[in-house]
Amino acid sequence: MATESQATTEHLTREAPNSVWTTEPARATTYSFPSMEPLRFVEYPRNHLLMPLRKDILHRAVIYEGDMTRQGSANTKWRDDVHGSGRKLHAQKGTGKARVGDKKSPIRKGGGVAHGPHPRDFSTSLPQKIYDQAWRIALSYRYRRGQLIIIDNDISIPEDATPYLIKEIFKVNNWGREFGRSTLITDQPNEGLFATVREVGEHAKILDRKDVDVKDLLETGRLIIEKQALDRILANHSRDLAAKPAKALY
Amino acid sequence: MRCQARTTTHVTGCLDEPPNGNHETFLKVAEVRNSCHTTAMRPSLRLLNLEVSSLQGSRTLYVCSVCRQEARPRPLVARQFLRNASNATPITERVRRKIWGTDNPPGLKDPYGGEGVLERKFKKDQPARQEEEPENLAQTSEQTQVENEAELASAEAYEPATTWEGLQRVGHLGRWSDLPPSEADAYESFMLKKKVTKKGQLSLAAHQAAVEVSLMHSLNKPLSKVCDVVEHDKSVFKMLWKCKIQPGEWKQAVVYPSKEAEKALVYIFEQIGGQPESAVAEETAEEVEEAVDESKWEDLVAEVNDSNVPFFGYADVRDKGFLSLSLSDPATKFAFLKRFSQLSGHYLPDPVVHSVATVGQVVEYVQSVLNPKPKKLADYLANSQGLQNLPNVKVFTKKQKPMDRDEELGRKKVIEAELRSRGLIDQKCKRYQH
């Protein structure tokens, strides 16, 4: 007991540590696409690319997206949906057989499915502010691990380029399968590029901004993203930052 | 039904009323009667030809199916006919030979009066077609002759392959990997395609980048322009290599080996961004080489003329002063890292870029990436010098069992042999169990 009391007094006498708030923005390098020449440093606010990791929020976002993408189109016929009459097959008593209802009963061949699936909507809800945070947390996670490569120009290849070029780019930059694959994210869909990259699917994955989900951001070894796409994603998912607390007007 | 009706009319010959009221059928049957009755009386082998030609071509002369059926030879005959179909001598000729008993029977070749009307008509068409072909052939004959000669000439040198190796690949599924890369597939990378891995070469890259950036600083030129010249001439590189770096301000960091070298380097770097230097450096460089005594450092230079070797075969830097240069200025840091990645092939990820404060930390980071910490504790302990030097400690990468101790003491083989001889372990079993 004596030792405990001693410890508490020491704690009380000790000075409280000053909390130091770093306000430095997140700095990133931008590159030009095929050559990967560093072009400049760019800055992003801390609440965009330096969000603390919240696995729970990421989990909720991924589940939310997974639920939303479920087709939910499984369909069966219950006994009422099966075509046929509701006539009783034989009399209740006197035949020596077990009592029966109509032919559409689930226990009979050709009958309905008992409590079978019907098309339905599996989507769940997630507050918009939490979902927006999840986007920024996912990007911050990538940034902090050095897996966010920002491209200053458009991700594009020459007209007559073949998948050999993509393979070579991935090989030189260590982006390929042995380094965990990479996701290319463009702002606008580009059919030629997309078709070419999909030929080397074992190394690369390509998506345009509208097709990207939080799950895609977390999936492969690194993200190679156009700056324009990144800026738009961040701008579209900052609703929780822009919201101001309600003020009393009286 | 229709067929039956027709045969009955044919046999009875009564055609006064059309059967079943079908007028078309009646007309046809009437026609048949006219043509058939002459031949139907005496079915001969010549009708065979008639039947064939009626099937093949002319529709003008109609032969009813009964006539055809009657004229058709019996199965045995048919087989004989088929068997001899390939023979040059026609069946009539062979029959004549058999009758006369000689190979050259007297009389007409065809005792039945030559070819029939249809046969003659049918044959008339064919020669006409055959005549056309020779004309075409005559036109192309000269070409084909030349080609044939060429083919013959190549045929002499032709050797059939015994294996598929070395043969041209003909035909594929048209996938991109079946075709060679196009011209547009050439990839120009900014950084070195083959990354530098040796410690000395990393230091060389960092040193060169530091000297160049500080030179640009002192000349007040845009720093990132140093990357315009990917690789300097060997003499220029040698001058850069001899420069020392004084820790402190980037502007006054470079210590030149001599006045001449300073002049040359300043002259060269004045031009960077405008036009790349080439011959200018060489004359001055020779003077510099004489002026500076570097016998002490000669052993660092491996004399390699191969241009593919990075840093012209130089193995390490002369002094380590550049390692403590500060990278606090973002522009300097950017220029330095850009040049460093161009020379070494290593990129620094963004968070590292903003945590490094000196050139030394950059080199350190790249080295740590190249030589990662072992993932297994056993490997880490086995490699640690402190543990290896202790006399009473041994580090194994595997768990030691009594069997290992037996092996160490040299009795494992004896034990194993004894166990085998007594039949206590399986003959095939490699290891014995304790």
Image: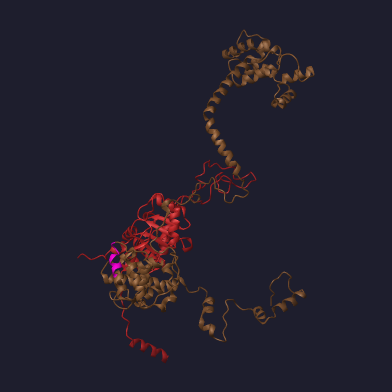
Chain colours: A red, B brown
Given the current orientation, which residue lies at the most extreme bottom position? A2
Q: Quadrant of residue A126?
A: bottom left
Given the current orientation, which residue lies at the most extreme left position? A250
Q: Position of residue B95 (x, y in %)?
A: 75, 19
User: Was residue B269 drawn as part of the magenta stretch in this picture?
Assistant: yes
Left or right: where does residue B165 sit relative to residue A30? right
In the depicted view, which residue is nearer to us: B60 or A76?
B60
Left or right: where does residue A119 sit relative to residue B225? right
Left or right: where does residue A78 sit relative to residue B81? left
Given the current orientation, which residue lies at the most extreme top position? B16
What residue lies at 75% left-to-right and 24% top-to-bottom?
A: B76
User: Was residue B402 drawn as part of the magenta stretch in this picture?
Assistant: no
Quadrant holding the N terminus of chain A: bottom left
Where B149 sits versus A67, above or below? above
Q: Is residue B73 visible in this depiction of the protein?
A: yes
What residue lies at 57% left-to-right and 23% top-to-bottom?
A: B130
In the depicted view, which residue is nearer to us: B295 or A202?
B295
Q: Position of residue B407 (x, y in %)?
A: 66, 79
In the depicted view, which residue is nearer to us: B181 or B166?
B166
Q: What range is drawn magenta here?
A: B266-274
What residue lies at 45% left-to-right and 54% top-to-bottom?
A: A164
Q: Is residue A70 visible in this depiction of the protein?
A: no
Left or right: where does residue A71 sit relative to residue B228? right
Q: Position of residue B425 (x, y in %)?
A: 73, 73
